[in-house]
């Protein structure tokens, strides 16, 4: 598990729309790195739409928003097109990055255990350090809290 003040593990992942995103290449921008369970589920869609609505505000705060899930690039492409998403969506199909960030965890649903991504957001400063972490995110009001933190960083 990664805590605040730690160096954010670097990564390169394929992204929706083609190409890839490398965390270290985004410096000196702040980065809002949010992990979400799955494209096109209700909570994940709402979170992505909320981040999209606030994308210009994040840009004014000097931050770029990157969403990461295990979904494939084609799934991300469909998700982005269907909902008009304007945030970077990266595919961590092998869960390597999610594991390094400590968000690929055992989950339970209907009495069944399985491994999956726990909804978590990391605010990374211009030097590449974790400035703030939100774990087990509840979607309503979350984007506003992250934006407020990004503005003061």
Image (cartoon, rainbow, N blue to C red):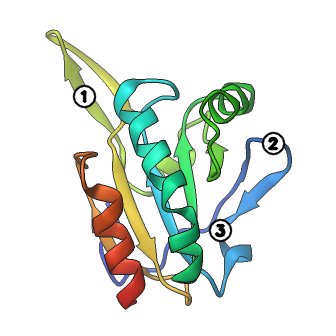
In this rendering, which labeled residue sits more in front, label 2 or label 3?
2
Does 96 sit above or below residue 45? below
Q: Earlier in the sequence, mark 2 or mark 3?
A: 2
In this rendering, which labeled residue sits more in front, label 1 or label 2?
2
Q: Residue at x 59, y 29 (%)?
A: 71
Residue 15 in the image, given as x and y percentages of width and height:
73, 46
Q: Residue at x 79, y 53 (%)?
A: 20
Q: Quadrant of the N terminus?
A: bottom left
The residue identified by callout 1 is: 107
Does 23 sit above or below residue 71? below
Residue 82 in the image, given as x and y percentages of width and height:
64, 27
Q: Is residue 130 left or right of residue 139?
A: right
The residue identified by callout 3 is: 23
Q: Is residue 74 left or right of residue 39?
A: right
- Secondary structure type for disc 2: loop
User: Marks 1/2: CA distance?
Assistant: 30 Å
The residue identified by callout 2 is: 17
Residue 130: image tag: none
Q: Residue at x 25, y 55 (%)?
A: 141
* Count of marks overlaid on the render: 3
């Amino acid at each position: 598990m990664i805590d605040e003040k730690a160096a954010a593990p670097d990564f390169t992942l394929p992204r929706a729309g083609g190409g890839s995103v490398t965390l270290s290449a985004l410096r000196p921008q702040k980065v809002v790195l949010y992990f979400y369970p799955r494209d096109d589920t209700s909570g994940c869609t709402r979170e992505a739409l909320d981040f999209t609505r606030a994308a210009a505000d994040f840009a004014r705060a000097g931050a770029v928003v990157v969403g990461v899930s295990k979904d494939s690039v084609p799934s991300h492409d469909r998700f982005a097109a269907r909902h008009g998403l304007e945030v970077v969506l990266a595919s961590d199909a092998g869960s390597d990055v999610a594991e390094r960030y400590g968000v690929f965890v055992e989950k339970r649903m209907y009495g069944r255990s399985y491994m999956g991504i726990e909804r978590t957001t990391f605010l990374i400063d211009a030097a590449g350090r974790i400035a703030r972490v939100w774990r087990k995110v509840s979607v309503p009001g979350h984007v506003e809290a992250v934006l407020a933190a990004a503005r003061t960083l």
